[in-house]
């Protein structure tokens, strides 16, 4: 209640606005840094210069970056998402086993039997489950 007396409604709303703008600013900085490092068409020197420009002149650097390369930010994000999806698909296929066909499963079972991991009766039982 003491803060309600000291701070008026206008000051609270203004503080919320400043907090919101600060949050947006941090978000923009992270987005710009991520895009600089994601960008494959920039050389290492160009990336270093952009990073230096954004660190030394933060407001101007982010504004210039958004004007100069803002149209590519979405493209880089889409490329990154597609790469992550393909990595996830490859990982799931590696973990789950790449052969989902009955022939591939039978081949895998035969290799397990040949290596001695499973015996002949277990091989026959699993084979009937796959085939039938």
Image (tube, rainbow, N blue to C red):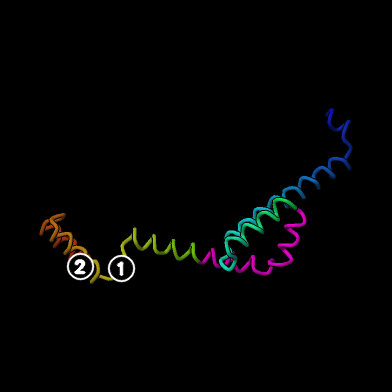
Give the number of the disc on residue 100: 1
Residue pictured at 60% horizontal, 65% vertical = 42
Q: In this view, does 86 lie to the left or right of 23?
A: left
Q: In which quarter of the image is residue 73?
A: bottom right
Q: In this view, does 98 lie to the left or right of 47?
A: left
Q: Where is residue 55 in the image (x, y as percent from the top left)?
A: 70, 51
Foreground pick, 62 / 3: 62
- Camera-near label (1 vs 2) is 2
Q: Does the magenta stretch include residue 68?
A: yes
Residue pictured at 10% horizontal, 59% vertical = 120
Looking at the rendered structure, the secondary structure element under dot 2 is helix
Residue pictured at 76% horizontal, 54% vertical = 59
Packing grade of label 1 (10 A; few <14, some 14-19, many >=20) is few
Q: Position of residue 16 (x, y in %)?
A: 79, 44
Q: Does the magenta stretch include residue 47?
A: no
- Is any part of residue 19 visible from this angle? yes
Give the number of the disc on residue 17: none
Q: Where is residue 51 in the image (x, y as percent from the top left)?
A: 65, 55
Q: What stretch is highlighted in magenta?
A: 58-82
Q: Position of residue 132 (x, y in %)?
A: 21, 69
Above or below, 7 relative to 72: above
Quadrant of image for the N terminus = top right
Foreground pick, 12 / 78: 78
Q: Is residue 106 left or right of residue 53?
A: left
Q: Quadrant of residue 39?
A: bottom right
Question: Label 2: which residue?
Answer: 107
Foreground pick, 128 / 120: 120
Give how far apart the Cα atoms at labels 1 and 2 are. 11 Å
Main SS category, magenta section? helix
Marked residue nearer the N-terminal end (1 or 2): 1
- Is any part of residue 35 visible from this angle? no
């Amino acid at each position: 209640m003491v803060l309600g007396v000291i701070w008026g409604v206008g000051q609270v709303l203004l503080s919320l606005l400043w907090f919101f703008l600060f949050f947006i600013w941090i978000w923009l900085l992270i987005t710009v840094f991520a895009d600089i490092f994601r960008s494959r068409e920039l050389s290492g020197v160009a990336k270093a210069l952009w990073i230096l420009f954004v660190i030394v002149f933060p407001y101007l650097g982010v504004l210039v970056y958004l004007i100069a390369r803002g149209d590519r930010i979405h493209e880089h994000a889409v490329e990154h998402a597609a790469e992550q999806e393909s990595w996830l698909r490859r990982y799931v296929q590696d973990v789950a086993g790449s052969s989902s066909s009955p022939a591939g499963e039978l081949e895998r079972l035969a290799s397990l039997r040949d290596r001695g991991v499973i015996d002949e009766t277990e091989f026959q039982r699993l084979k009937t489950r796959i085939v039938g």
